[in-house]
Amino acid sequence: MLSVNGPTVTTTKLVLGLGCERNAAPEEVIALAERALAEVGAGKEEIELVASLDARAEEAAIHAAGRHFSVPVRFFDAATLEAEAARLQNPSEIVFAHTGCHGVAEGAALAGAGLDAILIVPKIRSARATAAIAGPARDAGRIAIRTKRAGAT
């Protein structure tokens, strides 16, 4: 069940967090999202929501991903994403300088999935986009969680 009232959403499936540069190609963002799903053996039908930073609300690529997965797209303000900073695996001062939050893809995935969610796929990158997946901690046993490797950037 999806509830869009309040600062976070509660989901029973997975939330795909996306970040991208302005005018990123929809094909690039969708391919990155599909790669994130493949890394943990999850199917397209397991995505319940696409989430991102409100500064990307006009980005065609983010909306194209929502259409690709046939799910709603939700945008969060920077303060909401920054509230997730303690749960990020890849916080970035550079991202903070540009957006006001330490992580767009991871922060949006966690904000969209709710307080009990965990990162299932920490941030992965393509040339112009980032993606992360969060979901209920209770699903950790059925999905192979990808964790950050020591020394990974």
Image (spheres, helix red, strand yellow):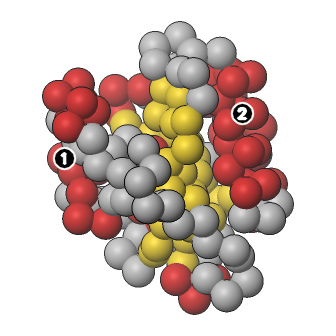
Q: Residue at x 34, y 59 (%)?
A: 88
- The residue located at (53%, 66%) in the rendering is 147
In the image, is residue 1 above or below residue 141?
Answer: above
- Percent of width and height locating residue 68: 77, 37
Q: Position of residue 34 (x, y in %)?
A: 76, 44
Amino acid of disc 2? Ile
Q: Tag 1: residue type? A: Ala
Mark toward the start of the polypeptide (1 vs 2): 2
Residue 94 appears anywhere in the view: yes
The kind of secondary structure element at disc 1 is helix
Residue 132 x %, y %: 53, 51
Work out whether residue 7 or residue 85 is closer to the camera in this orientation and state it.
Answer: 85
How far is disc 1 from disc 2 in space, using C-alphas? 26 Å
Residue bearing mark 1:
79
The quarter holding residue 84 reads: bottom left
In-front residue for pair 67/141: 141
To which quarter of the image does residue 12 belong? Answer: bottom right
Judge from the rendering whether residue 80 lies leftward or rightward of residue 16; answer left or right.
Answer: left
**38 in relation to 70, above or below:** below
Question: Which residue corresponds to the image point at 22% horizontal and 50% vertical from the top-left?
Answer: 82
Residue 30 numbered tag: 2
Q: Is residue 65 left or right of residue 9?
A: right
Quick check: marks 1 and 2 in contact, CB under 8 Å? no
Quadrant that contains the C terminus? top left
Residue drawn at 57 percent across, 16 percent down: 24
